[in-house]
Image (spheres, rainbow, N blue to C red):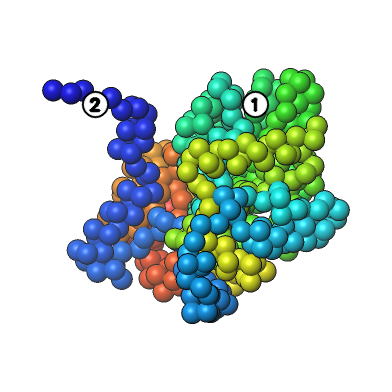
Amino acid sequence: MCILDLPQNTVALGESRSVIRDIFEYGNKRRAQIGADKVFDFSLGNPSVPAPKKINSTLSRLIAESDSTVLHGYISSAGLTDARKAIAIEETHRAKMNGSDLCVSYEDVYITCGAAASLAISLSALICPGDRVALLAPFFPEYRVFAEKAGAEVVVIPPSSKEMMPDFDAVERVASAGIKVLIINSPNNPSGAVYDRPVLERLAKILREAQKKTGKMIFLISDEPYRELLYIDTPAPFVPAIYENTLICYSYSKSLSLPGERIGYIVVPSCIQNAEAKKVFASISGAGRALGYVCAPSLFQRMIVECSKEKPDIGAYVRNRNLIYHSLTDMGFDCTPPSGAFYLFIKSPIPDACAFCEAAKAYELLLVPSDSFGIGGYVRLAYCVSEPTLKNALPAFRSLAKQYGLTGKE
Ligand code: PLP
């Protein structure tokens, strides 16, 4: 008999699966049993707004008119030069709109298979054994997976307030004890919180002081897949103009409703200190190579060349946000008002958010407990669903509120 030796932590990752995926699978089972219209599945961040029309027409034209061997052929590992140039123009434009004269070159752009790949590559590129990565709770659960796989020790920093803003004193304590990376995500999944310029400037000051104290460069990874899904007037800041040692991780999954197509990018801006940007970019290329994330889907890179300026129509998300936030608040639920993304973070009426999610299932309401987001006692509701689904779910929420004795305006 031969022995099978496998990395135990990797097996455990595969066996445990993500909580979100588990709930989604449960939803599939219930849909088959009682019908899709009776299941109120708020588990997945799968956009319900269709991709802009220009994307489908561009893809159809590319397929109809291109030489197929070229269209589907290998391209450069870091991406098609024309796609990298289109992205660089957009990022330079964002910098300018933020009052920065920073020019992003196409050579600063590495095209990836979505934000997940952008993050996994960036962390693998930066982390040396024993380095620490700080995560601001609540956070996208896969950060922990990518950071630990890259060899980092993860430090979780709880938020300071109900608005899910960073606890600056805690960030200062953790950073000055030594970290290599701080990951930020604004607009945030799961809370919908948005970091404005003063918040980012305070974080930048803390990181600069910690660098001075420890004598080691600290990187900010700005994970920005929801950058365009904003319900406030000011556009998302261009983070490298606020903190120089920043990598931008972006994806078209949410902004252009293309999550299944796996397309995004990393920007390694030239402002990185000590003229180290080229070395960091080399490490990004090396990590992409080592992880096998080279040459992201070429058809979608060709689409970017023509559609990089396309913006989402967020009207449906605005309507859903207003409906669900006000309805649940009126029923007596305690919700964080979301300023961006398409998630509502609700305080569980009992300390055990998992038990609350289980109870919600009795009304066919599928919610995600916050534990895997690095904080207990909350649940996440993804409101990127159709408006009728949201409206039809309200009586079920009313029954749930009644079960827990919540009293609101209703
Ligand atoms: N980062 C955050 C905060 C997310 O919410 C997600 C997906 O939900 C990702 C990264 C991964 O995005 P992608 O599907 O582009 O890999």
The percent coordinates of residue 137 (x first, y second) are 56, 38
Q: Is residue 157 above or below residue 266?
A: above
* Three-letter code for the amino acid on which mark 2 is drawn: Leu
Say whether residue 130 is visible: yes
Q: Is residue 296 left or right of residue 94?
A: left
**Residue at the location (32% across, 48% down)?**
22
* Three-letter code for the amino acid on which mark 1 is drawn: Ile
Query: Label 1 crowding class (10 Å Cα cut-off): few <14, some 14-19, many 20+?
Result: many
The dot on residue 179 is: 1
Query: Label 2 crowding class (10 Å Cα cut-off): few <14, some 14-19, many 20+?
Result: few
Q: Is residue 135 above or below residue 357?
A: above
User: Quick one: 340 or 49, which is closer to the camera?
Assistant: 49
The percent coordinates of residue 360 (x first, y second) are 33, 53
Q: Is residue 363 above or below residue 174?
A: below
Q: Which residue is mark 2?
A: 4
Mark 1 vs 2: CB contact within 8 A: no
The yes-or-no answer for disc 2 within 8 Å of ligand 1 is no
**Residue at the location (38% across, 66% down)?**
393
**Residue at the location (61% across, 66% down)?**
304
**Helix, strand or loop under label 2:** loop
User: Quick one: 80 or 404, which is closer to the camera?
Assistant: 80
Displayed quadrant of residue 352: top left
The percent coordinates of residue 14 (x first, y second) are 33, 39
Say whether residue 391 is visible: no
Return the disc, 1 or 2, that comes first in the chain's sequence: 2
**Residue at the location (41% across, 45% down)?**
369
Q: Is residue 253 left or right of residue 42?
A: right
Q: Is residue 124 above or below residue 261?
A: above
Count of labels in the image: 2
**Helix, strand or loop under label 1:** loop
